[in-house]
Image (cartoon, grey):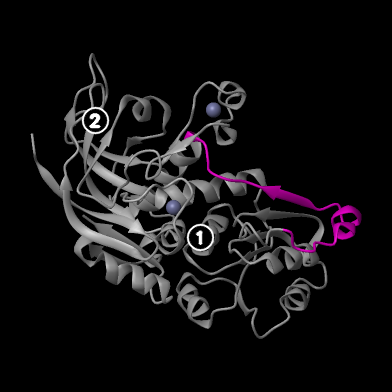
């Protein structure tokens, strides 16, 4: 067989090409999926610009994937009928470490990711070998799902995990630092959890403008205003119950601690640059105000299930978060729009 398909391959920092490459074969014991849609993630942009230690070029990236099963070579009875639409989350747990065995796979010691260990979704087809079928959270799209909207399931799953660990709930005043797609998802999610006031802060007037269509209770331009003072004023001096840092800027973690209410929770959602990850947090504030600094990364299958349900039900206003849907031939255009801050969420349809 020498079938080909179209895909975007990354050759190095700043060098990516839309080209014809061999179409993968359906793996023995696995599935072949026709990609329906694949979202462009902030981490993809980082890999496109700087490379990634786990990505060996040339490589197909893209990890916010939905698609339709076109071939099934799993032996015996299985639920994966041809024609079925799937959400294909990138995380593949090891299934054997202490945490996987204890039922907290979000702490898996050896997880691998699609688009790193296996080729990703900026391609017409993706092969899912048995290891992925058995140890990932892939599942059929729920009734009423849109494959394009469902690409948000991956980032949303991480947000759900963070909010669960931070126990975000009824009446909480939540400050989200970062008005990008992740900030927008946190805002929508906070609403589904009956948060009280949701305040969004960012240094980009552009991003703040676009997030206004989701109607946050307040927005703060952190480039122009003292955000700690603003949040204190908005909360009668008490501070916020929950602060989520959805950005890569170290200073925001310092500010988060300064604007927290006594007993408040700070969700460190965005990672920092690896050579600049020790911001000067006043740990006396953490101590005397009994604050909770909470780190989370990835998610468990149950978070992914919840994400798909929320997206299918329309509770998360995905159409207001996805700003551009483009054919894969327009990959370069989509990347540039995202890098220039002119797009919120870009989804490609290969
Ligand atoms: Zn992502
Ligand atoms: Zn594990």
| Vertical comparison of 272 with 104: above or below | below
Q: Quadrant of the N terminus?
A: top left
The residue beneath circle 1 is 182
Q: Which residue is mark 2?
A: 31
* 10 Å crowding of disc 2: few (<14), some (14-19), many (20+): many
For marks 1 and 2 on the same chain, the one whose residue lies earlier in the sequence: 2
Q: Residue at x 53, y 31 (%)?
A: 110
Can the viewer see residue 141 in this picture?
no
Q: Magenta stretch? A: 278-301
Look at the image and tell me whether residue 120 can be seen. Answer: yes
Q: Secondary structure at mark 2?
A: strand
- Left or right: residue 124 versus residue 177 is left
Residue farthest top in this picture: 76
Gap between marks 1 and 2 measured at Cα? 30 Å
Q: Is residue 169 left or right of residue 23?
A: right
Give the answer, above or below, for where 314 lies relative to 73: below
Q: Residue at x 41, y 32 (%)?
A: 136
Picture coordinates of residue 169 (x, y %)? 65, 51
> Which one is nearer the viewer's eye here, 169 or 10?
10
């Amino acid at each position: 067989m020498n079938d080909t398909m179209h895909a975007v391959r990354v050759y190095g920092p700043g060098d990516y090409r839309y080209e014809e490459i061999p179409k993968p074969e359906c793996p023995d014991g696995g599935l072949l999926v026709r990609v329906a849609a694949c979202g462009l993630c902030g981490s993809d942009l980082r890999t496109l610009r700087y490379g990634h230690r786990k990505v060996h070029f040339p490589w197909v990236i893209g990890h916010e994937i939905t698609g339709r099963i076109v071939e099934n070579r799993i032996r015996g009875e299985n639920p994966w009928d041809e024609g079925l639409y799937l959400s294909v989350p990138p995380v593949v747990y090891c299934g054997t470490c202490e945490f996987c065995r204890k039922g907290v796979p979000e702490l898996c010691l050896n997880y691998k990711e699609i688009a790193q260990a296996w080729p990703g979704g900026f391609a017409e087809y993706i092969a899912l070998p048995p290891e992925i079928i058995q140890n990932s959270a892939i599942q059929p799209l729920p009734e009423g799902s849109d494959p394009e909207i469902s690409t948000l399931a991956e980032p949303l799953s991480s947000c759900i995990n963070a909010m669960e660990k931070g126990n975000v709930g009824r009446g909480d005043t939540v400050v989200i630092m970062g008005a990008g797609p992740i900030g927008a998802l946190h805002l929508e999610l906070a609403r589904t959890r009956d948060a009280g006031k949701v305040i969004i802060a960012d240094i980009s007037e552009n991003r703040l403008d676009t997030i206004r269509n989701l109607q946050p209770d307040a927005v703060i331009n952190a480039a122009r205003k003292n955000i700690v003072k603003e949040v204190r004023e908005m909360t009668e001096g008490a501070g916020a119950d929950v602060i989520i840092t959805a950005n890569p800027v170290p200073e925001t973690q310092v500010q988060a601690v300064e604007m927290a209410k006594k007993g408040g929770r700070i969700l460190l959602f965005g990672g920092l640059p690896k050579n600049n990850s020790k911001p000067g947090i006043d740990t006396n504030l953490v101590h005397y105000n009994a604050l909770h600094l909470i780190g989370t990364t990835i998610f468990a299958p149950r978070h992914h299930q919840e994400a798909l349900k929320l997206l299918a039900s329309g509770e998360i206003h995905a159409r207001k978060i996805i700003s551009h849907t483009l054919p894969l031939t327009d990959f370069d255009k989509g990347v540039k729009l995202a890098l220039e801050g002119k797009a919120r969420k870009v989804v490609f349809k290969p």
